[in-house]
Amino acid sequence: MRKIIEISLLFSLVHFFSFGQKDLSGNYFNKSGTKIVIKGNELNYIELHVYTPVWYNDTLAKCTFKWIDDNFIELNSIQPYIIVQQGLKVVQSFDLTNKDSIVISFLIPFQRNNLDISVFTNALKSFDLNYSKDNRELMLPNDTKSMTFTISPGIYLTPHSPDGLYYGVLYYSSAEYVIEKNVNHISIEVPAVDDTFFEKYYVKGDYTKVSKDTIIWKGEVFVKKK
């Protein structure tokens, strides 16, 4: 009798944890043709504009998800800060031709327009750079001990929804960097900030409803195509 009870309890637990957590893999489309592609627990949101391209990359969101209950999943994407940090290179050096200041050089693949870069020093002063392919450097006082910087697109951001909502990041803010002794040139390479960086969704804790072969996300209904 005890063994039967144990087996029944085990079956109930398995049923409890697996109920509703079906495999969602497949392609889902809304009325405008935008699609969600799911494979395993990964979800990609793809928005196509065939005749009038709006985005540099049609995959606006890459997320993973977990089940919250029988009807809802929670979506999350990698934090943009982490994405930037993975490829960020900061190299400090000494340049014999420069004695009066510390030159900060940026190398960023973003080409859509100019970027707004602000460098903040330990003296609580800020130095601004309107970054472009022809304007990549700014100078700090040679007694600067540490610095941080921010990068923003510097223009009106294209909204992600007809209501004017924007789901991406507004700027990147760096960690603090201590400037080593005798350094007068700092090269900062930020490969992650390309033409797609500010147009991507940053998804954090988004609840999405799942019903049969339908996904409802941000007010849009996506139906699985069989």
Image: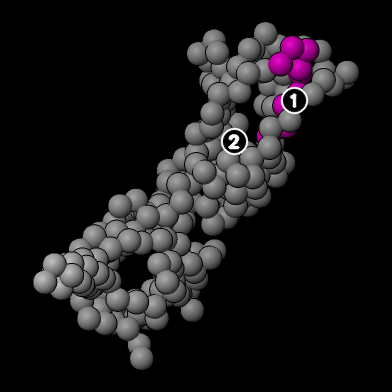
Q: Residue 122 in the image: x percent, y percent?
A: 55, 13
> Measured from the top left, where is residue 7 in percent x and y?
20, 71
Frontmost residue, 151 versus 63: 63
The residue most toward the bottom is 226
Q: Secondary structure at mark 2?
A: strand
Give yes or no for residue 182 being in the magenta stretch.
yes
The crowd level at tag 1 (other Cα within 10 Å; few <14, some 14-19, many 20+) is some
- Is 137 displayed left or right of 124 in the figure? right
Extreme residue in the right direction:
96
Q: Where is 214 relative to 75, above or below?
A: below
In terms of image quadrants, where is residue 139?
A: top right
Farthest residue to the left: give it: 1
Image: magenta residue range: 180-188
Q: In the figure, residue 41 lies in which quadrant?
A: bottom left
The residue carrying mark 1 is 92
Outermost residue toward the front?
1
- Display coloring: one colour
* Residue in the image at 60% along x and 52% along y: 194
The one nearer the camera, 25 or 155, is 25
Q: What residue is pinned by disc 2?
A: 130
Of residues 146 and 141, the one nearer the viewer is 146
Under mark 1, the amino acid is Gln
Q: Which secondary structure, mark 1?
A: strand
Percent position of residue 176, x then y: 55, 24
Which mark is in front, 1 or 2? 1
Residue name at image x 30 percent, y 76 percent = 22
